[in-house]
Image: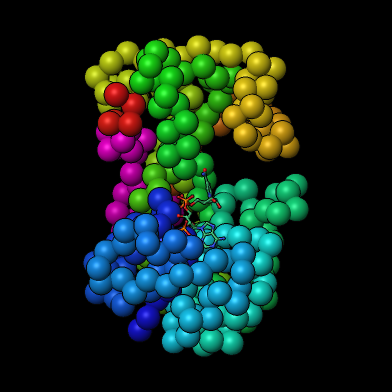
Amino acid sequence: MTILVTGATGVVGRRVVAELLKAGRHVRALTRRPATAALPGEVEVYEGDLEHPESLRAALAGAERMYLFPVPGTASEVMALAAEAGVRRIVDLSGAGADDETFEDGYHVVERAVEASGLDWTHVRPGEFAGNWLDWAPSIRTDRVVRRPYGGAVTQPTHEADVAAVAAAVLLEDGHAGQTYTFAGPEALTTVEQVETIGRAIGERVRFEEQDPVTGREQWIRDGYPAEVVDWLFGMWAESARDPAPVNEEWAAVVPRVTGRPGRTFAEWAAEHAAAFR
Ligand SMILES: NC(=O)c1ccc[n+]([C@@H]2O[C@H](COP(=O)([O-])OP(=O)(O)OC[C@H]3O[C@@H](n4cnc5c(N)ncnc54)[C@H](OP(=O)(O)O)[C@@H]3O)[C@@H](O)[C@H]2O)c1
């Protein structure tokens, strides 16, 4: 059985590929840049671009299962081609906020396209990736500081390896069709606690400096984040800082249930990525 992994050179996609190879499966990988993909030798690499669905025909031919990296604009066409090619199972990477239809180009667009395809589908909806905080690496490396608003905001960071493990389990095992797995890591941590955890991972004190939200907003927009995304994120964090939620046990239970192993902690993630912060 052939499994096609799109987004295969990504943080999650590479790990999905590794899990499938470990399980002895025949893996095809889609990339826009095969020359620099650096995927394992056993992987059959296909050039293609999800924004140009026709470019996927060769990769789809003969594939029975597929991990879909979310590209909303073309998701319907990609799904139609997948169905035509004989793919039977789709596992789509989505996000915990998929029910929020604030953004026209959001995860819900991909989810609806996947559901309309007539194929067996499973939505993988992770919460905030631990890896987002690689954004802090430059200021931690140079000044051992993180400057941000809402130090008291609580999130439940999700290790990307757990996202891949959930996706791989769904690709490999039966019984997940029609399920929506919304999940996150095992702990709820404030931003300040996450900064301290990175400090422990590198064996140095890392300071948190509370930034005023107006300055923070300007900086994020300068850094390239769309204003509407910044406002949405800051709104959530402001609310969380005012009223920090405890760990969402339902979300924390999904990784152990689906993968059979405990969810990875933020401390594990920080230890694995310590070199980026030193
Ligand atoms: N960050 C979060 O907190 C969070 C939370 C929930 C969900 N998510 C979802 O997770 C995604 C990130 O996953 P990730 O970390 O694995 O991604 P990533 O590291 O950004 O990599 C995505 C890969 O997808 C491929 N890709 C991008 N656009 C493509 C296109 N048009 N056609 C074909 N391939 C394309 C790229 O490969 P090539 O360059 O080799 O083609 C890239 O390596 C986000 O985009 C979001 O949808 C994120």
> What's the residue at 25%, 68% (across, down)?
41
Residue 214: name its quadrant: top right
> What's the residue at 48%, 24% (across, down)?
191
Instruction: Pick whichever, 44 or 241, lies toward us.
Output: 44
Residue 169 coordinates in the image, percent (x, y): 37, 66
Q: Say whether residue 265 is magenta.
A: yes
> What's the residue at 53%, 75% (across, down)?
56
> What's the residue at 39%, 13% (across, down)?
143
Instruction: Pick whichever, 82 or 98, lies toward us.
Output: 82
Q: Is residue 192 left or right of residue 198?
A: right
- The number of callouts visible is 0
Residue 224 coordinates in the image, percent (x, y): 62, 34
Give the quarter of the figure containing the N terminus. Answer: bottom left
What segment is highlighted magenta in the picture?
253-273
Instruction: Pick whichever, 121 or 278, lies toward us.
Output: 278
Q: Say whether residue 274 is magenta.
A: no
Q: Is residue 251 left or right of residue 217?
A: left
Asked whether residue 119 appears in the rendered view, the answer is no
Seen in the picture, residue 267 relative to 50 is either above or below; the reply is above
Seen in the picture, residue 12 relative to 22 is either above or below; the reply is above
Instruction: Pick whichever, 251 or 2, lies toward us.
Output: 2
Residue 254 coordinates in the image, percent (x, y): 43, 54
Q: Main secondary structure of the magenta part?
A: helix
Asked whether residue 201 appears in the rendered view, the answer is yes
Give the quarter of the figure containing the C terminus. Answer: top left
Seen in the picture, residue 187 relative to 244 is either above or below; the reply is below
Q: Name the colour scheme.
A: rainbow
Seen in the picture, residue 257 relative to 113 is either above or below; the reply is above
